[in-house]
Image (cartoon, rainbow, N blue to C red):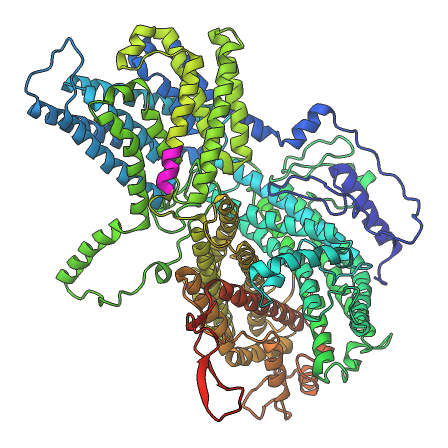
């Protein structure tokens, strides 16, 4: 800026240099993963002012070289072996080793007898490495199911024993083993089937019961298959007691390990995730700065090579198979011409945006556990919620800036600017002219966004330091800590007036930087107007030559769209800065009120605990928020609401009396038996009985006990999945995991020459290594758990034989095998169990991963329709003044904001789940036609983009959440009716009163005019959702909303403004404030969308609405094309044809020349 002094420039340079030296931050496009870790995969954009490629490099001062990490540190960094991971590895491996080690005691061995190995297995399944909140919830459910299972087991054994006693002709000889009794076996088998069916039905309905159902199945399988050898009440009570005691001991060891050995509070996990989110935001801002700066010289309209192939496919009429070969050939042919130099920056931004969404959803999942945790900390539970909402208020505009890549790509596609060697010169000239204008605009945007991005990074760090989410940076000189908190007594003389993150006066400095960016926006717009010939060098915006800008036609729409995109970028930049400012103000307030002065005991309120207990068995988002599932691989089961799950019964009216309600209750029983959850439970029961039947037949029950086939049944309980894709992937992974476990157990046993202390050391080491894969690769969790269980099972059995002897070990009917035979037997048993589980997953009819993918896509589109509907109602309530204050509970605005946040959270959980289903479907064999993977990926990509654009619309209209201001026009409009000149965060008026009221009145009329368009978007999304859910064809001629509908409608409204009093010929009135003659004359002289109003905040934020609406409409059109290719289009059109001879006779024939499948075009 011209008004900046050289001294101020030096302060900025010195401030940036000191920050980089003290905190080790690097400029440019740092690549950050989903956990906030910096991977720095490329360095070509690390300089803020990169010279052109044809210029000579200028000598630059070389930064201080960092010492190259050694070999050990390189391995640690590459494999992600940070402190939390290493602690979780060695902590989780401790419990099973302790469970086997205590068996070396004579008292323990005498108590547990042949069930000692179960202590270690249960310790593995407890997973003591979980954070405290998740572990406690899982422990409570495990204990509940274990105790219920023990009680049910007593009932099973007693009833089977009674069947034996009532059918036994000769009493049993106490000195000999009990003889086989068919009645006893039949009763046990019946109980086994019913129990497995019920528990797996609950497991499918409530995924948080996954581990408890496995614990229940272990007890039920062992006792039911052992029941044929029980001949007295004393024997059944003894075996149930020993089995229950062993499993409770395993839980007790895991509990002590989790709570006493390096405990990991759930609050610490959430704080670490928030720290990663802040670092990820800092990296995202740097990447966006590098990308926008690269646009000063690069071709922003060139389509990157990684663009989804189905994007072009959905716009063409060709089929998937016929277009794939040609598309791939053209891609290779034109790759050198269409791939820009900014591909690396664009890819980095897209990857970071995905990680931002993923990490935000993870925080939303884990934060409830942190709020329920008992902790010795400073921040209360509501403070953690506020921090997440403030971070979300920064994530949304930062993510919106990243959509600029997609905007430029769409402009190039729609205007035919994807150039090749055969592109006409006229199109090349038009493209180059727009490219030149954007290059000049981006040069003007260079300095403001560079300063703003640095300020945003500092503001995020300041907030993290004050709230103790981020560590305090090291000072150049040692200084004593101040008693007030994180502020430090630095050497004032060495720093001068420089204010660093964490200093008391940082908020004031940050406000000044935000205002500086706001002041420089006019300069950028002036540069654009000058390039378009709308303004001379020194003219003001009131003297813009807008004749050519308002002429209409293609050039007018191109220029207006260009201005909207520029305002879109600027407004989101400013919104990101203001979001960080709110975060900074919140952090300062927590220091000022003494919250961060000392720690205190944080105890959850009884209301929170009641909601926690009720939510475990609730339908509302049951899988993610309240699921502490060990086998959670990221697939979300989202509650859609009654309108999606429950459908009206066309054969029954709602009940009106008592007997009709009783009848509905009876009908609910049949509905339960026909549900998908019940079908999965029945599959599990059939799979279990496939192997369990061997234990209940006279000729094979001894073989079942000798060969330990009960573990094949337990593998079925662990390995059964609802879809065939997971089953095939899981089958292969479980076999491989068991094979690895066999190798590791043989190494553990023989490398130390069968010495017990050495066996425990190597077992502990291999358990820790296995936990690494469990922590780093969630998709391998079942296989890793099976590998750990197999190690404990084999080694535990051999240690048991060493302790109690071969004779006592064989008293249960299982002969002794040395480890070199036992390990292969275990592998064979596991393979058999996995094979049976796989068979019953696909038989009699498979529930494929592709079916789940289609259903989840239908759910996603349904949620998007709900999301857009709530956004629309929010805008209506604000413009009509019926919403009230969203921060006051009970008001319509509060309910709408809460519902918007709930839908946003559901979508953030569901979209990554779609990718998980898409990955698993590759493991399914294709029988018949090819699976249209490209079309499904295109629908997923478009649904993700629509969610991003709707989130920006929600942020523009309703703010970033509770307690956040966002960049809402309507909030400022409401404020303007109370205060004639509402102040922005910097203290300067952002919205003038007449400006605010003019935009509000115009938007109110606009909303009434475009209501059919908004309803059309909702109806289209709902219709596409229903088509994917049911597989029915969509109706023909779906009307897609026109992209520039908002602009045309507002131009029409402004064109009707006539007369001195502001009345229009059509009854539309946009009135100025009383006494505001200047503003009144200005709005009467030209409309709201005139180029002379481009510097007004209402114009800029309307541009955001327009750009987002346009992008939504574009992707909606692509969705219609892709879905129509999947389900077909209903077509009853006919045409009249005449014969070649020219006779007058004519016939009515359909479009399908063969007359096949009349009424549907696929």
Nearest the viewer among 958 and 595 is: 958
Q: Is residue 244 visible?
A: yes
Residue displayed at 30% across by 15% down? 814
Nearest the viewer among 953 and 1096 is: 953
Magenta-drawn stretch, dominant element (helix, strand or loop): helix
Residue displayed at 51% across by 52% down? 911
**Is residue 836 one of those drawn in magenta?**
yes
View extreme (front): residue: 1141
Q: Position of residue 350 (x, y in %)?
A: 65, 52
Q: Position of residue 496 (x, y in %)?
A: 82, 43
Q: Position of residue 896 (x, y in %)?
A: 45, 63
Tell whether 969 sits left or right of 416: left
Q: Is residue 720 visible?
A: no
Q: Position of residue 745 (x, y in %)?
A: 48, 17
Tell whether 354 sits left or right of 382: right
> Measured along the vertical axis of the image, is residue 1034 above or below residue 380?
below
Q: Which residues are magenta?
A: 835-841
| Residue 974 position by quadrant | bottom right
Q: How many marks?
A: 0
Tell whether 983 sits left or right of 339: left
Nearest the viewer among 204 and 930 is: 930
Residue displayed at 43% across by 64% down? 1027
The quarter of the picture where the N terminus appears is: bottom right
> Measured along the vertical axis of the image, is residue 42 above or below residue 533?
above
**Is residue 57 one of those drawn in magenta?**
no
């Amino acid at each position: 800026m011209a008004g900046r002094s050289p001294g101020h420039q030096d302060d900025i340079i010195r401030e940036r240099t000191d920050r980089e030296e003290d905190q080790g931050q690097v400029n440019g496009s740092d690549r950050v993963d989903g956990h906030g870790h910096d991977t720095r995969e490329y360095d070509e954009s690390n300089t803020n002012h990169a010279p052109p490629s044809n210029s000579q490099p200028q000598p630059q001062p070389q930064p201080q070289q960092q010492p190259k990490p050694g070999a050990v540190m390189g391995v640690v960094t590459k494999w992600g072996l940070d402190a939390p991971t290493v602690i979780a590895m060695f902590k989780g491996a401790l419990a099973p080793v302790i469970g086997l080690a205590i068996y070396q005691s004579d008292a323990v061995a005498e108590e547990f007898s042949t069930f000692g190995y179960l202590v270690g297995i249960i310790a593995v399944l407890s997973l003591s490495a979980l954070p405290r909140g998740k572990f406690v919830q899982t422990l409570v459910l495990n204990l509940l199911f274990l105790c219920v299972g023990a009680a049910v087991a007593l009932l099973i054994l007693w009833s089977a024993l009674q069947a034996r006693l009532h059918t036994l002709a000769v009493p049993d000889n106490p000195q000999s083993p009990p003889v086989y009794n068919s009645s006893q076996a039949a009763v046990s088998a019946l109980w086994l089937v019913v129990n497995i069916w019920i528990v797996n039905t609950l497991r499918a309905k409530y995924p948080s019961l996954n581990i408890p159902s496995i614990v229940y199945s272990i007890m039920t399988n062992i006792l039911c298959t052992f029941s044929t050898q029980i001949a007295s009440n004393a024997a059944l009570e003894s075996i149930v007691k020993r089995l229950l005691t062993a499993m409770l001991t395993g839980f007790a060891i895991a509990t002590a390990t989790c709570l006493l050995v390096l405990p990991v509070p759930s609050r610490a996990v959430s704080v670490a995730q928030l720290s990663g989110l802040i670092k990820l935001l800092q990296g995202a801002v740097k990447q966006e700065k590098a990308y926008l700066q690269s646009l000063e010289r690069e071709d922003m309209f060139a389509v990157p090579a990684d663009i989804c192939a189905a994007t072009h496919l959905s716009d063409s009429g060709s089929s998937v198979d016929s277009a794939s070969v040609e598309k791939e050939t053209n891609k290779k042919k034109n790759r050198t011409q269409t791939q820009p130099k900014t591909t690396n920056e664009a890819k980095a931004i897209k990857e970071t945006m995905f990680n931002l969404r993923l990490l935000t959803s993870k925080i939303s999942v884990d934060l409830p556990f942190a709020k329920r945790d008992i902790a010795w900390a400073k921040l209360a539970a509501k403070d953690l919620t506020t921090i997440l909402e403030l971070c979300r208020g920064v994530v949304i505009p930062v993510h919106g800036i990243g959509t600029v890549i997609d905007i430029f790509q769409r402009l190039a596609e729609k205007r035919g600017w994807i150039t090749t060697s055969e592109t006409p010169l006229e199109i090349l000239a038009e493209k180059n002219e727009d490219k030149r204008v954007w290059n000049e605009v981006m040069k003007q945007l260079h300095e403001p966004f560079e300063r703003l991005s640095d300020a945003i990074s500092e503001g995020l760090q300041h907030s993290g330091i004050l709230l103790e989410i981020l560590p305090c940076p090291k000072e150049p000189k040692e200084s004593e800590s101040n008693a007030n908190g994180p502020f430090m007594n630095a050497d004032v003389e060495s720093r001068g007036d420089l204010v660093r993150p964490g200093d008391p006066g940082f908020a004031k400095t940050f406000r000044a930087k935000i205002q500086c960016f706001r002041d420089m926006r006019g300069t950028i717009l002036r540069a654009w107007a000058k390039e378009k010939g709308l303004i001379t060098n020194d003219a003001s915006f009131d003297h813009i030559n807008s004749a050519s800008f308002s002429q209409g036609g293609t050039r007018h729409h191109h220029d207006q769209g260009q201005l909207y995109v520029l305002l879109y970028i600027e407004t989101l930049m400013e919104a990101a800065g203001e979001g960080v400012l709110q975060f900074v103000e919140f952090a300062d307030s927590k220091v000022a009120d003494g919250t961060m002065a000392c720690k205190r005991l944080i105890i959850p309120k009884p209301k929170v605990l009641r909601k926690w207990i009720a939510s475990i068995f609730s339908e509302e988002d049951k899988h993610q928020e309240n699921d502490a599932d060990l086998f959670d691989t990221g697939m979300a089961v989202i509650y859609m609401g009654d309108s999606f799950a429950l459908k009206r019964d066309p054969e029954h009216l709602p009940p009106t009396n008592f007997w009709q309600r009783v009848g509905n209750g009876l009908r609910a029983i049949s509905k339960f038996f026909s549900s998908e959850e019940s079908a999965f439970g029945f599959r599990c029961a059939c799979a279990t009985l496939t192997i369990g039947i061997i234990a209940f037949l006279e000729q094979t029950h001894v073989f079942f006990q000798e060969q330990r086939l009960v573990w094949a049944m337990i593998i079925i309980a662990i390995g059964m999945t609802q879809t065939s894709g997971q089953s095939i992937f899981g089958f292969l992974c479980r076999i491989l995991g068991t094979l690895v476990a066999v190798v590791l157990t043989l190494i553990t046993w023989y490398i130390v020459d069968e010495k017990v202390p050495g066996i425990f050391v190597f077992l502990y080491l291999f358990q820790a290594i296995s936990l690494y894969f469990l922590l780093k690769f969630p998709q391998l969790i079942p296989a890793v758990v099976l590998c750990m269980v197999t190690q404990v099972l084999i080694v535990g059995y051999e240690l048991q034989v060493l302790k109690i002897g071969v004779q006592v070990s064989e008293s249960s009917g299982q002969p002794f095998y040395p480890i070199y035979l036992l390990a292969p037997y275990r592998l064979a048993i596991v393979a058999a169990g996995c094979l049976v589980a796989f068979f019953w997953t696909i038989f009699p009819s498979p529930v494929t991963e592709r079916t789940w993918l289609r259903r989840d896509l239908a759910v996603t589109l349904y949620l998007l329709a709900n999301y857009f509907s709530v956004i629309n109602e929010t805008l209506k309530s604000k413009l009509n003044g019926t919403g009230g204050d969203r921060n006051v509970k009970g008001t319509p605005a509060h309910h709408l904001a809460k519902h918007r946040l709930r839908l946003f959270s559901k979508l953030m959980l569901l979209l990554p789940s779609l990718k998980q289903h898409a990955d698993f479907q590759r493991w399914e064999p294709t029988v018949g036609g090819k699976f249209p993977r490209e079309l499904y990926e295109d629908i997923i990509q478009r649904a993700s983009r629509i969610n991003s654009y709707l989130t920006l619309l929600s942020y523009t209209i309703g703010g970033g959440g509770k307690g956040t201001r966002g960049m809402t026009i309507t909030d400022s409009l409401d404020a303007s009716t109370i205060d004639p000149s509402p102040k922005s965060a910097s203290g300067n008026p952002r919205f003038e009163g007449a400006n605010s009221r003019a935009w509000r009145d115009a938007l109110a009329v606009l909303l009434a005019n475009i209501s059919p368009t908004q309803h059309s978007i909702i109806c289209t999304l709902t219709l596409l959702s229903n088509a994917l859910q049911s597989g029915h064809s969509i109706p023909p001629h779906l009307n897609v909303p026109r992209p520039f509908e908002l602009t045309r409608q507002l131009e029409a409204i402004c064109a009707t403004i006539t007369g001195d009093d502001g009345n229009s010929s059509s009854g539309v009135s946009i009135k100025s404030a009383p006494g505001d003659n200047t503003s009144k004359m200005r709005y009467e002289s030209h409309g709201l969308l005139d180029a002379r109003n481009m510097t007004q905040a209402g114009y800029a934020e309307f541009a955001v609405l327009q750009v987002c609406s346009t992008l939504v409409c574009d992707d909606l059109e692509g969705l219609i094309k892709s879905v129509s290719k999947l389900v077909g289009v209903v077509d009853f059109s006919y045409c009249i044809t005449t014969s070649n001879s020219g006779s007058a006779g004519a016939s009515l024939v359909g479009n399908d020349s063969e007359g096949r499948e009349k009424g549907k075009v696929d």
